[in-house]
């Protein structure tokens, strides 16, 4: 459509007339963007006014309002005055006529003020107001009298119409010119992209002289990937370019590829008339990391534009110059919260004790982000002095402040934060609760009891993963200390059960093998070890444990014989007949009862079948 090709236009008109897809037709109507003198689709739009699709009718009427030719207005007036046409179509036509703003529509609209349809009368009245800018009456006689007085246009009114027409033509030419420029820019950039000599920077240097800003910016962006002295010199020169965007780009690039020799040029850009250039220059000086720029950046803290002050503050933070600490602290009282925030972020990179008290005071700032970054910065300092104020901030109304505060307490690592962080596990905000949990893992607790309280908290939240981490830490840190022997066994038991509940039988087995030796009367541990060994198919090891338990508890060993039989029966099913016979023989020597009359009979039966299977006759049968 933008290329105005008649063949394309005709094809689209054909679709509007003949397509069965209403959605497509509505989309095309909206996409046409009819010009004021374009009536090629006039008949099509008028026909669609009677469509059964409401959206189609509305779109058609809206499009007709863009066609302001005499013929179009006459056609629409004819429909408006035709009593045989549907009321809905005539009402839509009133809106289209109003959109044209044409005086030629006034008389037909006045005529339908006497219509039997109240809705049509109202629509015609609204259209008259839109065209004439008169709103003093609703009666037909009022409008007729007004029209009789005004239908003969004055010279000034005709001149106004001519001016409107000229302005409309100018807008059309401007659109066409803009489209042409866009095409030139697109083609030029494509040519640069497809250049055969990828390392040849000459085409990009030449493109910097283009009259089109987009071409210049693209070329400069490509040159930014090169660090040759010639390229650096080009960007130095661009700092004084007439185009603001080019100057911004130049200082940004010099912050990446420049060196000490370009400092003076970037410093000079701190005096640029445009705020964005000064802001970018300050940021680039911070990236260069040269302390020779400190004095000028300190001066930039007095810039009238707060965005420049913010950039200068953050740049000073990158440079970590001692003389910047006090000026940055002074910014804590600035009225702009963004300035206060930037100063706090900058001081977070200094680790300077002079900032501790001002930062603690900033925890009470009325701005959420200032409190957030003050907490974050205090965490990075690691100062114990901030622990109590930070604990108080855990009840802040802002979830992000609570999250940042939890992180800060974790970084400081003081044990007094454990209790408050445990309470934060129930925070309504999931991110806050997650951060509190992570920080509880990071704090190096020296108290076994405190670690226990963290484990209990994770248990309560069903956070098995983190509970296991703390339990492993307990066992590692306190193993071998006699005074913690009893408590450690309890921790091992809890850890084993967590592994067991998470179906991690391999890790659970290692612990259970220790635990059954220590808690030799704990049936639950024994049963869970049996499950784990079965899961791992470690039947030999399981049989050795079962044998041991039978020997050590002759009075109450009925629980283990069914387990033994189940394992031996499984071996029989796997055709391990020799092993079945040997195991039954061994167990019978240790305990002739073999678990009682019933099981003994079943054991004998298995042994008999195994022996039969092993005999030559059994093998041949």
Image: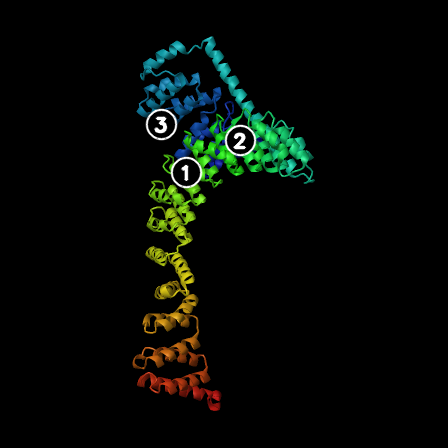
Residue with the mark numbered 3:
87
Q: Residue at x 41, y 11 (%)?
A: 151
Residue with the mark numbered 1:
359
**Residue 233 appears in which quarter of the rendering?**
top right
Left or right: where does residue 52 sit relative to residue 322? left
Labels 3 and 2: the sequence-earlier one:
3
**Is label 2 in a helix, a strand or a loop?**
helix
Closer to viewer: mark 3 or mark 2: 2
**Residue 582 appears in which quarter of the rendering?**
bottom left
Closer to viewer: mark 3 or mark 1: 1
- Tell whether label 2 touches label 3 (CB within 8 Å): no
Q: Is residue 480 visible from the viewing direction of this image?
A: yes
**Is label 3 in a helix, a strand or a loop?**
helix
Percent x, y of residue 402 = 37, 43
Q: CA distance from mark 2 to mark 1?
A: 22 Å
* Label number found at residue 297: 2
Left or right: where does residue 285 sit relative to residue 149? right
Left or right: where does residue 123 sit relative to residue 224? left
Q: Which of 289/562 is in front?
A: 289
- Tell whether label 1 touches label 2 (CB within 8 Å): no
């Amino acid at each position: 459509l933008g290329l105005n090709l008649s063949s394309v236009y005709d094809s689209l008109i054909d679709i509007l007339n003949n397509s069965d897809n209403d959605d497509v037709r509505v989309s095309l109507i909206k996409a046409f963007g009819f010009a004021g003198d374009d009536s090629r689709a006039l008949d099509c739009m008028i026909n669609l006014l009677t469509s059964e699709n409401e959206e189609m009718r509305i779109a058609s009427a809206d499009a007709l309002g863009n066609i302001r030719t005499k013929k179009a207005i006459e056609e629409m007036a004819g429909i408006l005055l035709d009593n045989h046409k549907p009321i809905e179509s005539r009402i839509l036509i009133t809106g289209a006529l109003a959109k044209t703003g044409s005086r030629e529509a006034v008389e037909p609209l006045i005529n339908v003020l006497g219509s039997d349809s109240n809705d049509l009368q109202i629509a015609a009245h609204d259209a008259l107001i839109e065209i004439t800018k008169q709103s003093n009456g609703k009666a037909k006689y009022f409008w007729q009298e007004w029209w009789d007085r005004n239908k003969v246009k004055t010279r000034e009114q005709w001149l106004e119409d001519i001016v409107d027409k000229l302005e409309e033509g100018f807008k059309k030419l401007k659109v066409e010119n803009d489209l042409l420029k866009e095409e030139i820019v697109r083609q030029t950039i494509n040519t640069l992209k497809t250049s055969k000599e990828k390392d040849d920077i000459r085409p990009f240097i030449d493109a910097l002289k283009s009259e089109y800003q987009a071409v210049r910016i693209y070329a400069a962006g490509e040159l930014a990937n090169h660090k040759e002295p010639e390229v650096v010199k080009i960007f130095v020169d661009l700092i004084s370019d007439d185009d603001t965007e080019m100057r911004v780009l130049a200082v940004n690039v010099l912050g990446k590829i420049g060196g000490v020799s370009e400092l003076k040029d970037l410093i000079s850009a701190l005096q640029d008339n445009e705020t964005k250039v000064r802001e970018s220059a300050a940021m680039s000086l911070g990236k260069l990391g040269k302390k020779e720029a400190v004095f000028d950046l300190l001066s930039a803290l007095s810039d009238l534009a707060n965005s420049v002050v913010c950039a200068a503050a953050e740049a000073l933070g990158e440079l970590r110059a001692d003389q910047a600490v006090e000026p940055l602290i002074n910014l804590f009282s600035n009225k702009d919260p963004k300035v206060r925030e930037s100063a706090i972020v900058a001081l977070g990179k200094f680790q300077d004790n002079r900032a501790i008290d001002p930062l603690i005071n900033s925890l009470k700032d009325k701005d959420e982000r200032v409190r957030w970054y003050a907490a974050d910065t205090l965490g990075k300092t690691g100062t114990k002095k901030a622990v109590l104020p930070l604990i108080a901030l855990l009840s802040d109304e802002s979830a992000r402040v609570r999250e940042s505060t939890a992180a800060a307490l974790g970084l400081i690592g003081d044990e007094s934060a454990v209790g408050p962080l445990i309470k934060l596990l129930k925070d309504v905000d999931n991110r806050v609760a997650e951060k509190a949990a992570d920080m509880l893992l990071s704090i190096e607790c020296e108290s076994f009891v405190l670690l226990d309280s963290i484990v209990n908290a994770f248990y309560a939240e069903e956070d098995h993963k983190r509970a296991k981490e703390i339990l492993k830490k307990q066992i590692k840190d306190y193993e071998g200390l006699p005074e913690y022997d009893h408590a450690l066994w309890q921790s091992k038991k809890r850890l084993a059960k967590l592994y067991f509940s998470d179906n991690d039988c391999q890790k659970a087995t290692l612990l259970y093998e220790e635990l059954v030796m220590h808690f030799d009367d704990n049936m639950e541990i024994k049963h869970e070890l049996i499950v784990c060994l079965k899961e791992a198919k470690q039947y030999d090891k399981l049989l050795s444990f079962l044998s041991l338990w039978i020997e050590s508890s002759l009075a109450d060993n009925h629980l283990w014989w069914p387990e033994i039989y189940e394992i031996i029966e499984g071996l029989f099913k796997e055709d391990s007949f020799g092993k079945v016979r040997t195991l039954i023989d061994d167990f019978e020597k240790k305990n002739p009862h073999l678990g009682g009359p019933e099981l003994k009979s079943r054991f004998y039966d298995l042994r008999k079948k195994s022996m039969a299977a092993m005999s030559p006759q059994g093998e041949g049968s």
